[in-house]
Image: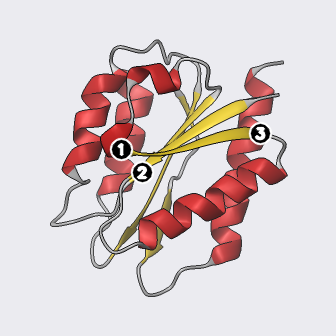
Amino acid sequence: MYKAVIIYDSRKGQTESIARIIEQGLRDGGVEVLLKKATSATAKDLRDADAVVLGSPTYHGEMMSSLRTLLFEMEKADLRGKVGAAFGSYGWSGEAVPRMSETMKHVFGMNVVEPGLNVLERQSDLNKCREFGRTIAERAGQGRK
């Protein structure tokens, strides 16, 4: 069975809700999922994952500091070729998702699902979130063939 880890942080609960819906989409795709808050995640959590999914709201044009810290921690893991994906919520600008995606792609050499999922806070589409999870599950399955 393929394995994914979803690591996220949330300010108002929107990004956490999205994480849980993506988790369901991954499970629908036959993937075993570990869901963790960024403040408790380490490089060890990534070791056996086929896919790493990061989530952060955009706050003042940035990802949350816990995700920036996690990106430094991720340098300790060998993620080259693994599936990566990013998601988040935003109110005005949405820079967190592309920044996380670019780091996974260019720094860690991951096979990134693009574009990432950026959800406007007031317009959450549950089906879009679940489908994003299924897309990640399909990509993880292709990477292991």
Q: In the displayed orientation, state which residue is furthest to the front.
A: 40
Residues under numbered marks 3 and 2 in contact, where contact means CB atoms less than 8 Å apart = no
Q: Name the residue under label 3.
A: 31
Mark 1–mark 2 Cα distance, whole angstroms, equals 5 Å
Q: Counting other residues with Cα less than 10 Å from the Cα at mark 2, is it few (<14), some (14-19), or many (20 or more)?
A: many
The residue located at (58%, 18%) in the rendering is 81
Q: Which residue is drawn at 52% across and 69% down?
A: 17
User: Is residue 87 visible to us here?
Assistant: yes
The one nearer the camera, 120 or 19, is 19
The secondary element bearing badge 1 is classed as helix
Specify the quadrant that holds the N terminus: top right
Q: In this view, does 56 lie to the left or right of 78?
A: left
Q: Are marks 1 and 2 in contact (CB under 8 Å)?
A: yes
Q: Which mark is residue 8?
A: 2
Color scheme of the displayed model: secondary structure
For badge 2, the amino acid type reads: Tyr
The answer to whether 3 is drawn above or below residue 8 in the figure is above
> How crowded is the residue under tag 1: few (<14 C-alpha within 10 Å), some, or many (20+)?
many
Q: Give the percent coordinates (x, y) of residue 23.
A: 65, 53
- Relative to 48, is 135 on the left or the right? right
| Residue type at numbered disc 3 | Val
Helix, strand or loop at label 3? It is loop
Q: In this view, does 71 lie above or below 119?
A: above
Local SS, label 2? strand
Give the residue number, with chain letter if any, for mark 1: 38
Quadrant in the picture for the C terminus:
top right
Nearer-the-camera pick, 145 or 67: 67
Identify the mark nearer the N-term, 3 or 2.
2
